[in-house]
Amino acid sequence: MSNRFRVTLVRVLTIQVITLLLLGWLQHHFSTPP
Amino acid sequence: MHPLNWVIVVGWLAYAVSHGIRRSKNTKELEGYFLANRSLPWWAVGLSVMATQLSAVTMIGTTGQGATDGMRFVQFYFGLPLAMVLLGVTLVPFLHGANVFTAYEFLERRFDAKTRTFTALLFLLSRGMSASTIIAAPAVVFSAIFGWNLWLCVALIGVPAILYTMVGGVQAVTWVDVKQMFLIVGALLAVVITLLVQIPLSPGAALHAAGAAGRLRVFDFSFSVTNTYTFWSGLIGGTFLMLSYFGTDQSQVQRYLSAKSVEEARSSLLISAYWKIPLQALVLLVGVLVFVFYETHEQPILFNPSNDRVVRAAEPAQYAALEQRFRAATSLAARDSARAAAYELTSTVTHQAVKDVKKADVNYVIPRFVIGYLPIGLAGIFIAAVIAAAMNAISGELTSLSTATVIDFYRRWIRHDASDAHFLVVSRAATVFWGIFACIVAKFAVNLGSLIEVVNRFGSFFYGSILGVFLLAMIPRARANGAFVGLIAGMAAVGFVNFSQPDVSFLWHNVIGAVTVVVVGMALSLAQPQAVEAARAL
């Protein structure tokens, strides 16, 4: 696995994890009454 | 609709066609026409890749799905970022470095002519039919909403796209895609802001209302091969589907073959890796907010105006009673129950399956909102964005269909040695042929519902299998016969699963197809030299 590929993979997966955490927060926070 | 909205729609169509033609250079050479002389910047290619995948079905069907089913559809794309990274280090360097016009041309260099021709033929069959559904879906909705002749709606979408694709080739397609992506995202953001203003609740309260109705439920961690919209189906099955689509489908491959270099081709795919899931979430959020809007405003029991007219005329008393029950309902469950009864009644009157009635009704949720409640000007922008999305998808398909027809069939089997001028005439004729074919099939698609479904199902038979062949192409010991027999075995395996276990989601067909091709293909390839050696020993 080349260094460049590793950096790209980590960057893409980091962004994806942040996106999924945001979607998870949206689901969790707004599914319970205020 | 207000005349100003139509001025915006017609103005945008005229701009798109003229812009596409104006931005096309060196289209007198085959490489310029089909691959833009490999000169396009990564960001334009990346936006074009996203635009080709975002069709009018996304603008009206997916937003409708957001309103009726919530956000869980976004799980379908969870495998996409990983697929983009994997393609960047595997197929993209192979294909871009091979200096080919089509992905299938690469297969002949690696394996043989029969594998190339067979995969190209499968591409033409599936994309030829899917091009028609891309036009049919919005045309049917426009016809019902505006009361127009279906031919007119098909022509409104098909003719401008055919025109700029035929004249400008891949350059026109890419640059129009770029401009139209800005229009589409701008229209979606403008609708979200308008909805937040029009809903008589604070943004937080509106989202709480959506959450309480289950519309913000994104994640389903259950493991079920029969459910398409789960985390695991999206992550595993979705990765294989995206690898197949972005790695082997000419409509996508042609986009990044036109990039300046392998690095720029890789970077173009990373735009989708970063932005596809947020964009899809935005599309679904529009639908979710429209759901909240209708919860605070009067809404029709059936969104499809033509079904509404037909059922009202055929069963006036029963329909009026259902409408009364719907209006009197005080809970979401009671309203859903009344609406389900209306779908049943529509099914009885129109002789359609209930699931088809429901599926079609979902497509009218957003258009009814756009026409009825969006301010003058913004409604026109949204309609223009729906047509733009349809044109993006259809133009990408037309240029790739034309490329595969000319390069993989005409130039390969009929005329090898003609001039570029000759091939360009044939290419433009092929673009027009596929465009007219898509328009004609789209016109009759309404009555060919089951046939279209058969074709789509047939498509899922070989999508993963073609990916398997490309994976084999990257394994040095794989041989041509192994790849071809593996391809047939992969399609047979998917066909067997499809008929013996019809509930298995199509996302898993791609996994089954790709794995079968690689296993069978490698087994035969490894056995082949031994067989030759054994024969020699005799």
Image (cartoon, coloured by chain):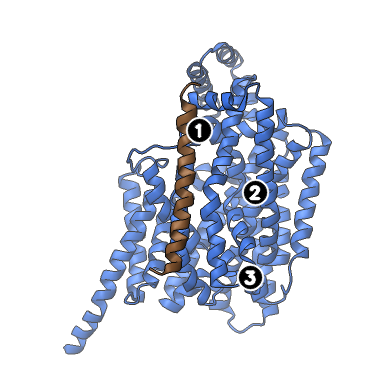
Chain colours: A brown, B blue
Please tell me whether mark 3 or mark 1 is closer to you in this view: 1
Q: Position of residue B474 (x, y in %)?
A: 39, 72
Q: Residues within 10 Å of mark 3 (few under 14, many from 20)?
A: many
Q: Which chain is indicated by disc 3?
A: B
The residue where tag 2 is placed is B389
Q: At 61% from the left edge and 31% from the top edge, which residue is drawn? A: B365
If the image is split into quadrants, where does the C terminus of chain B sit?
bottom left
Q: Position of residue B394 (x, y in %)?
A: 63, 54
State left or right for residue B532 relative to residue B68: left
Q: At 59% from the left edge and 51% from the top edge, which residue is drawn? A: B132
Element under disc 3: helix
Q: Residues within 10 Å of mark 1 (few under 14, many from 20)?
A: many
Q: Which chain is indicated by disc 1?
A: B
Residue found at the very far bottom of the displayed protein: B537
Is B318 located above or below residue A16 in the figure? above
Closer to the camera, B531 or B219? B219
Q: Amino acid at mark 3?
A: Phe
Mark number displayed over residue B404:
none
The residue where tag 3 is placed is B34
Q: At 52% from the left edge and 65% from the top edge, which residue is drawn? A: B266
Q: Amino acid at mark 2?
A: Ala
- Disc 2 to disc 3, how far (Cα)? 21 Å
Q: Position of residue B495 (x, y in %)?
A: 35, 53
Q: Which chain is indicated by disc 2?
A: B
The residue where tag 1 is placed is B70
State left or right for residue B114 relative to residue B359: left
**Reading the chain from its start, which is encountered first: label 2 or label 3?**
3
